[in-house]
Image (tube, rainbow, N blue to C red):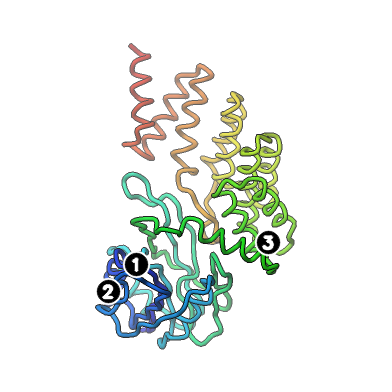
Amino acid sequence: MAAVSLCMIVKDEEDVLGRCLDSMKGLVDEIVIVDTGSADRTKETAALYTDRIYDYPWVGDFAAARNYAFEKGRMDYLMWMDADDVLPPEEADRFIEMKEQIADEDVIMMPYVTAFDEKGRPVFHYYRERIVRNHAGFRFQGKVHEVIQPAGKIIYRDIRIEHRKLRVKPGSGDRNLKIYEKMEENGEYFDSRALYYYGRELVYHRKYEKGAEVLSCFLTRLDGWTENKIDAARQLAVCYYGMCEEQKALHSLLHALEYDVPRGEICCDLGRHFQDRGRYEQAIYWYKQALHAKKAPETGAFIDEDCYGFLPAVSLCVCYDRLGNRREAEKYNELAGIYKPQSPYYLSNKKYFERKAE
């Protein structure tokens, strides 16, 4: 059985670290904790699980901190998690089974679930390079949104890690943006991935003009990853909507179609564009495309589950109702109910149609 070191960087995580380590207790062979400046009882919590606790001064560089943690790992393989991540209990046996099956693999990709619906079901996820072979030269890159470039023998295992944030830590909301802005101020080079994520951070903070500038620059890069380009075109549309340039927003969404087979997310974006402008026939076309779109998880794409079922179905209900086609409207509302039977949108629509039938 392959031995795995769990290597983590933490700061002021006393409220979640125990939960994370409890979920991995007995599953990994070593736990390495690198503290970047906690002022709470994070290190005391860590000491309940391991004696391999190290201090590392925070220098505004996540990759540097994670690489330091990896340097301390002594097992065959290195695994990373954030303090507010957990391995669900139902995945424990499959994790052990995976360790028993690992032979000469270099990188193990696993789903990362970062958003949930009102019932706690995963709705947003993507694959991440979760476990890598030790002493094989794997290093994190990027001061923010750090990543390991997968290489060698890569396998995918459907064993999910869930990001279960309890709170937003003070100062963390604009932390990433400040790091990028400092990089720009210092004249540092932005590789394509950094440029893409800088653009996303600007969009999150509603700095639309600057965001449009950065994302447009990223889209001219020849080495940009396809999935990032698709999402960048979507984020660029958000910028243009925020700048009241609707035609440019539409062109940006259509530009995303150049990169690959249309995904459910972009189809829903286009459907919403036309629906918001009362062009229901066009909206219906794109929402139906979303219902038939195929997910592409192993490309590393961000997958919004609602865009492949519930969202286009409930939107089709609205569009058909606006066109006076009650039969089709009810049909698609019932389809939405199959995906989310307790959704307030589905239930409200159902009552609406019942009243109209009286």
Q: Nearer the viewer, mark 3 or mark 1?
A: 1
Question: Callout 2: helix, strand or loop?
Answer: helix
Q: Which is nearer the N-term, disc 3 or disc 1?
A: 1
**Is 208 drawn above or below residue 221 in the view shown?**
above
The reply to whether the C-beta atoms of the residues labelled 1 and 2 are less than 8 Å apart is yes
For the residue marked with disc 2, what is the amino acid?
Thr
Q: How far is disc 1 from disc 2 in space, using C-alphas?
A: 9 Å
**Is 147 drawn above or below residue 70 in the view shown?**
above
For the N terminus, the image quarter is bottom left
Which residue is disc 3 drawn over? 224
In the image, 172 versus 301, the foreground residue is 172
Circle 3 crowding by C-alpha within 10 Å: few under 14, some 14–19, many from 20: some
Question: Callout 3: helix, strand or loop?
Answer: loop
Residue located at (64% from left, 50% from top) = 211
Q: How far is disc 2 from disc 3 in space, using C-alphas?
A: 41 Å
Q: Quadrant of residue 219?
A: bottom right
Residue located at (55% from left, 35% from top) = 287
- Marking on residue 13: 1
Looking at this view, name the residue that lies furthest to the top: 358
Q: Which is nearer the N-term, disc 2 or disc 3?
A: 2
Left of 266 or right of it: where is 18? Answer: left
Q: Quadrant of residue 281?
A: top right
Q: Nearer the viewer, mark 2 or mark 3?
A: 2
* Residue 57 drawn at (x, y percent): 47, 78
- Marking on residue 45: 2
For the residue marked with disc 1, what is the amino acid?
Glu
* Residue 346 drawn at (x, y percent): 37, 31
Q: Which is nearer the N-term, disc 1 or disc 2?
A: 1
Residue located at (59% from left, 44% from top) = 266
For the C terminus, the image quarter is top left
* Residue 2 drawn at (x, y percent): 39, 83
* Residue 311 drawn at (x, y percent): 47, 38
